[in-house]
Image: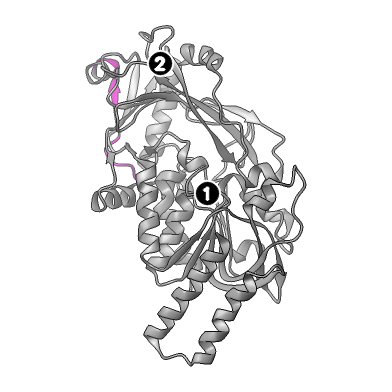
Amino acid sequence: MLKHALERLLRNSERNLRSSFSLSSSRIMRRRSLCTKAARAEIGRERAECVVIGAGVVGLAVARELALRGKEVLVLDSAPTFGTGTSSRNSEVIHAGIYYPPHSLKAILCVRGREMLYKLCSEHDIPHKQIGKLIVATGASEIPKLNNLMNLGIQNGVDGLRMIESSEAKIMEPELQCVKALLSPVSGIVDTHSLMQSLVGEAESHRTTFSFNTTVIGAHLERNNLCLHVSDTKRLENLNGRFLLHPDLVLIPELVVNCTGLSAPALAKRFDGLHSGVIPPAYYARGCYFTLSSTRNPPFSHLIYPIPEDGGLGVHVTVDLDGQVKFGPDVEWIKGIDDISSFLNRFEYSVCPDRAKRFYPEIRKYYPNLTDGSLEPGYAGIRPKLAGPQQSPVDFVIQGEDAHGIPGLINLFGIESPGLTSCLAIAEHIAARFSR
């Protein structure tokens, strides 16, 4: 896969260069010889303009944005296809921008990203729906927290927020039990797979090359250039816990964007020359989802969210575009993730049916008519967090040369929720700030 991607990258380069000015035949042959060298058993070296590591929704958005701005982009991912990690294991919610501290990256990029996402979905016929959200207080003690959320949302520029009494909430959602609710009409849902397919297609149509089953295992600095160590994923899969020391290829890009999500801190630690003090600690919060066994008559038509909890937004209700009702995610902190497991997405994603016992009492706080035995195991996801249990939430970290001193390197750390909503705005931010 890596060899073919590089051959395509070089062919594209030749074609684009020919269209702008004539190349001598000897120069074209020199470029072709690079690909021949990369295919040898010896470690080859290649140059590239922009390399995006990670083909989740954020990496795809970054690749697309750079490509739309005329950059030649190579996307590397260890998986066989795009979006196999956090991007395909979330609530698929388009967030309004309520929960985040004013002026934080999460607040700014969520609000901007939501606007961009709705526009993109409309223009490209990506399935989505602006169904609205109710954040509910199920007891009097939670009302001040609800008021705080409304104030945060207003400061962040979220339109249409309105506090409603339980009677109005009951009219909107007859199955809902609450004492008060915050209505967010601009919240919605999106088909993430269709979104990612659209991003891939648009990126490819603007000179982006994708190389799957390709893992970046580290990097070193050479005359102030970051040289990426790249390997075929299959080599890592056969190592039985030992880490590969020698790459198949060294890539020398002008711009590198580390968009690897769950493995972003682990990968950054393998960039020789990057000071360890700039790499934040990594925490992993596993979340399970359960589905309602019968959705012939879905109990809710809006997103229903409780007051946020430590590590997440609480076990909430999502109605997807097919009418399936989902509850989740919960929060389970996990430890002991080694680098290879992180790089290859070897996380435990199965959902134990017994875990439903913890869901029923949480859901019944706002949906008392939930019947026993109606929850079925759905799926699980892992949040790439920068704060652990009982710690205050941490903002997105988008780290450039001003933070770590390495030209052309951008690290994205802690891109959890609202990463999906913010993906286009994150891409815009990176392209505007870091690409020349």
The residue where tag 1 is placed is: 80
Asked if residue 156 shows in the view, the reply is: no
Nearer to the camera, 301 or 54? 54
58 left or right, relative to 129: right
The residue where tag 2 is placed is: 138
Q: How is the image coloured?
A: one colour
46 left or right, relative to 196: right
Boundaries of the magenta span? 157-167
Residue drawn at (70%, 60%), measured in percent from left and top? 271
Look at the image and tell me in which quarter the N terminus lies.
Answer: bottom right
Q: Amino acid at mark 1?
A: Pro
Height in image: 284 above or below 231? above
Nearer to the camera, 193 or 392? 193
Asked if residue 396 shows in the view, the reply is: yes
The quarter of the picture where residue 184 lies is top left
Q: Counting other residues with Cα less than 10 Å from the Cα at mark 2, is it few (<14), some (14-19), or many (20 or more)? A: some
Residue drawn at (68%, 52%), measured in percent from left and top? 235
User: Where in the figure is residue 260, as x and y percent of width and height?
Assistant: 57, 51
Q: Amino acid at mark 2?
A: Thr
